[in-house]
Each structure stands twice: as structure tokens, then as C-alpha cells.
Amino acid sequence: MSKKAFIFDLDGVIVDTAKYHFHAWKKLANSIGVDFTEEENEQLKGVSRVKSLEKILLWGNKSISEEEFAELMTLKNDDYLSYVNKMDESDVLPGVKEVLDQLTALNIPIALGSASKNAPTILKKVKLDKVFKSVVDGNSVKKAKPNPEVFLKAAEQLGVSPKDCIVFEDSQAGVKAANIASMVSVGIGDKNILHEANYVFEDFTKISSNFINELLKK
Ligand code: BG6
Ligand code: MG
């Protein structure tokens, strides 16, 4: 049995911010005459801010100047932050604290692996900023998921081999990234959407302490 580590995505895994991203992108897209469905929104999950706007423009067949691009990114983020600013500890998704507490009690290293540049702000808001031994987020990676850079960097910082890392992810891009990194992928959400994950749970309340213990034994 080798030393294991757990890597958590943030948006849609630890907190329900995936819905805020969706609302903010939809409002912004609509303001420039583009619309997209909830199904298409799956392609925006786990994807960086820049890549998300590129996809939306592609869907709407729009081309804009660099200045407009930067302006739209700011508008989206300001709108998104208006939701984030209202968050507190109660916004940590059900069952997440229990898993974090179990791992902390066992002295298992845990990292955050998120595409978001807002990750440090959100962790502070929900009072989880002291829990992660390593935080790798949109401010420290160059390549967006499904590129495995974010997870490989987290594994390196924790000093654990990628194959001994277990990743919790709600996005197709993130599950792909974990798989490419040869990590164990645990999807949080719909098993039809996250079918590439090694395991899928609807949410953290469905993850038993036994399941965590089994992963630790592998
Ligand atoms: C990911 C979200 O975690 O972070 C994406 O799933 C989001 O929807 C991305 O676009 C970047 O987030 P932010 O907060 O830097 O705009
Ligand atoms: Mg996510």
C-alpha cells in the first residue's frame, strides 16, 4: 500500500458554484445575442474563463475585438462574484465536510485542483482555506482541463505519485484530465454525463467512509 492523496475540484464538487457560472455565462451570452442549453453548458464546466467565452462566441458564430473580449470576461466575472460574495460556510455541499474530516483525521494529504481564478476567494468565504495542503488553481496553471497539468501539479506538490491520487470531479473535462494523469477519477453528478469516470456518485452524501477506506487500501 503506497501513500495516497486526494484532489478535489472546487466548482460543483465542494460548492454549488457551477450553477452561478451557468447563470452568469447565460446572462452574458444573451446580452450579445447568443443562447446555449444546459446540455451545452456541460462543455463549459471545468474549462477556464477564456476558453468558456471562446466556446460561447463559437456557438453564436460571433467574432469580437480583443478589447470587447476582455470587457465581456470582466462583466461575467463581476456578475459571478455578486453571487460568490453572498456565500458562507453553509454553501459547502452536503457530505463534503465529512469526507474532508475523515481524510484529515487519517492524515491523508488533500489538494484543491481547480480551473478557477476565484478559488482562493471562495475557499475563504466557505472557511475551507486552511484545509488543503496544496491549492492549485486557475492562477497557477497554463493549460485548461482536460489537460492534466492542474492535477499533476497538485500531486507533485503533495509528493505523491499520480497513480496514487484520487480526484473528485463534476466535469467531463476534469474526469478526462484525471484519467490522462493516470489518477483514479471519481465523478460527482450524473453517471450518464460522467461515464468516463472510474466511479460516479450523485453527491458526497452517497460516498461512505468505507468507500474512502477501500480506495486507501488499493
Ligand atoms: C471551473 C468552472 O472550475 O472554473 C468553470 O467549472 C469556470 O465553469 C472555471 O469557467 C474558471 O473559473 P473562474 O472563477 O476563474 O472564472
Ligand atoms: Mg467543477
Image (tube, rainbow, N blue to C red):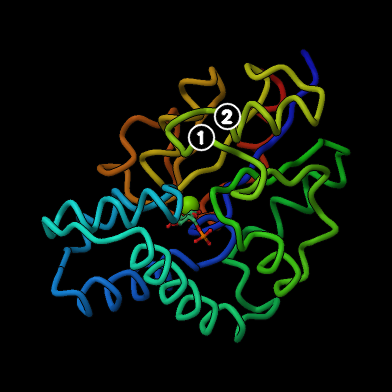
Point out residue 114 in the picture as x, y percentages from the top left corner: 58, 48
Disc 2 target residue = 149
Q: Residue at x 30, y 75 (%)?
A: 28
Residue 132 is left or right of residue 115, and the answer is right
Point out residue 141 in the picture as x, y percentages from the top left corner: 61, 39
Q: Residue at x 61, y 32 (%)?
A: 151
- Label 1's element? loop
- Local packing at callout 2 (Cα closer than 10 Å; few below 14, some 14-19, many 20+) is many
**Mark 1 and 2 residues: CB-CB less than 8 Å, in contact?**
yes
Q: Quadrant of residue 19?
A: bottom left
Point out residue 186 in the picture as x, y percentages from the top left corner: 50, 37
First reached walking from the N terminus: tag 1 or tag 2: 1
- Label 2's element? helix
- Local packing at callout 1 (Cα closer than 10 Å; few below 14, some 14-19, many 20+) is some
Point out residue 194 in the picture as x, y percentages from the top left corner: 34, 40
The amino acid type, in three-letter code, at marker 1 is Lys
- Image height of 18 relative to 192, above or below: below
Res 143 label: 1
Q: Nearer the viewer, residue 66 or 88?
A: 66
Per the model, the C-alpha gap separating discs 1 and 2 is 6 Å
